[in-house]
Image (tube, grey):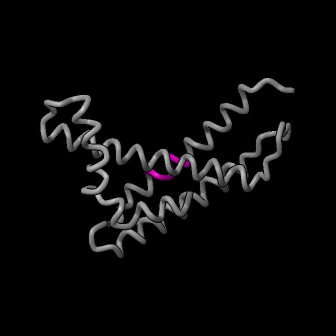
Amino acid sequence: MMVVIFSASTDLGRMENSSRLIGPVVRFFVPDIGDASFAAVVFAVRKCGHLTEYAILAGLLWRAIRKAIRHDSRPWQWRTAALAVSVAAIYAVTDEVHQSFNPHRMGQWQDVVLDTCGASAGVAAIWFVRKRRKPR
């Protein structure tokens, strides 16, 4: 997942490139969308991508740190969850620093906050699913 995030921080993840993928889908569903609305939708989809990729990263980190096993009945440990979110947040900082060295990209602290929120949401989703799961 870190490789995916790293590659998205290069020129491949530029607004112009991602709108080539997102744009046709938006225009298919809303053919008469205005330019300002189109830009807002592309922006929102890109930011949702931040949330999603860091939610997945934190979930994978949580699983790796916990050394999950099938039918794991061990109790939830907040320390493991906090460590997974912290590592994801640190990676978010390094990702934005990486972007700041790319002439076509710029690192933003707001994206670090968004990425950390995504990581927190990913770990929270795991907690919620585990809490709702019936014991075996």
* Residue drawn at the location 85% of the way across and 37% of the way down: 73
Looking at the image, residue 42 sits to the left or right of residue 66; the answer is left
Q: Nearer the viewer, residue 86 or 126?
A: 126
Task: Classify the position of the N terminus by image quarter.
Answer: bottom right
Task: Classify the position of the C terminus by image quarter.
Answer: top right
Residue 72 place in picture, x, y as percent? 83, 39
Among the 4 quarters of the image, the one containing residue 15: bottom left
Residue 60 place in picture, x, y as percent? 65, 51
Q: Is residue 8 above or below residue 54?
A: below
**Magenta stretch: includes residue 49:** no
**Number of numbered labels in the structure image:** 0
Q: Nearer the viewer, residue 37 or 90?
A: 37
Residue 126 place in picture, x, y as percent? 66, 38
**Magenta part, dominant SS:** helix
* Residue drawn at the location 38% of the way across and 68% of the way down: 99
Residue 23 place in picture, x, y as percent? 25, 43
* Residue drawn at the location 42% of the way across and 47% of the way down: 49
Looking at the image, residue 1 sits to the left or right of residue 114; the answer is right
Task: Find the magenta span and give its range.
Answer: 114-119
Q: Is residue 52 above or below residue 131?
A: below
Looking at the image, residue 54 sits to the left or right of residue 39; the answer is right
* Residue drawn at the location 17% of the way across and 31% of the way down: 31
